[in-house]
Image: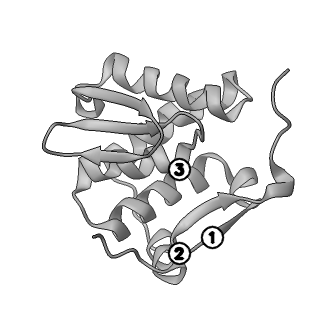
């Protein structure tokens, strides 16, 4: 069972974060979604497509569109909860692939990337434990 960091640990790491090459690539690809897509769920899938098209570092043996987020390092599988699309959760699992199993590293890098690319959305979020969540009143209405 993983030991999850506190909000304070995540924020301290985010505030002292130095972006490495992989974080810069993730930020750049995520920034491209900002210009093209307004819907959070569609943005997630577009982001994944951009990454997987041209960068083998970020490719996975399989992407499992199911009901939970996870990274299976033994089989190189990225699990995506298609019922709850989340850029931060996806970045978190991708950071496990890039940086290992440490929860503080994965979460702080994911939050730092998200904060850099979407500062206006980040300001509408709060922490529940170690997880960054969008405030309920800030959610967009569902697409018709």
| Mark earlier in primary sequence (3, 2) | 2
Instruction: Determine which of the numbered discs, if any, sits on residue 11 in the image.
Output: 2
Residue at 85%, 20% (x, y): give it: 144
Which SS class for mark 2? helix
Q: How far is the residue under mark 3 from the one under mark 2?
A: 14 Å
Instruction: Please provide percent x and percent y for residue 128.
Output: 61, 71
Q: Is residue 77 left or right of residue 24?
A: left
Q: Nearer the viewer, mark 3 or mark 2?
A: 3
Above or below 41: residue 115: below
Instruction: Please provide percent x and percent y for residue 88.
Output: 53, 50
Question: Crowding near pointer 1: few (<14 within 10 Å), some, many (20+)?
Answer: some
Residue at 68%, 21% (x, y): give it: 36
Instruction: Please provide percent x and percent y for residue 138.
Output: 83, 52
Q: Residue lying farthest left?
A: 74
| Mark earlier in primary sequence (2, 1) | 2
Instruction: Determine which of the numbered discs, if any, sits on residue 127 in the image.
Output: 1
């Amino acid at each position: 069972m993983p030991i999850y960091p506190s909000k304070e640990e995540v924020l301290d790491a985010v505030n002292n974060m130095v972006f490495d090459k992989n974080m810069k690539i993730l930020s750049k690809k995520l920034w491209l979604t900002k210009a093209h897509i307004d819907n959070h769920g569609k943005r997630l899938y577009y982001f994944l497509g951009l990454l997987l098209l041209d960068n083998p570092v970020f490719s996975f043996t399989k992407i499992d569109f199911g009901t939970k987020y996870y990274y299976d390092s033994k089989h190189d599988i990225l699990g995506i909860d298609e019922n709850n699309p989340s850029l931060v959760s996806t970045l978190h699992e991708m950071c496990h692939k890039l940086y290992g199993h440490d929860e503080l590293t994965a979460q702080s890098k994911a939050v730092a990337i998200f904060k850099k690319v979407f500062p206006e959305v980040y300001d509408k979020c709060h922490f529940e434990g170690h997880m960054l969540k969008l405030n309920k009143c800030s959610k967009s209405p569902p697409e018709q």
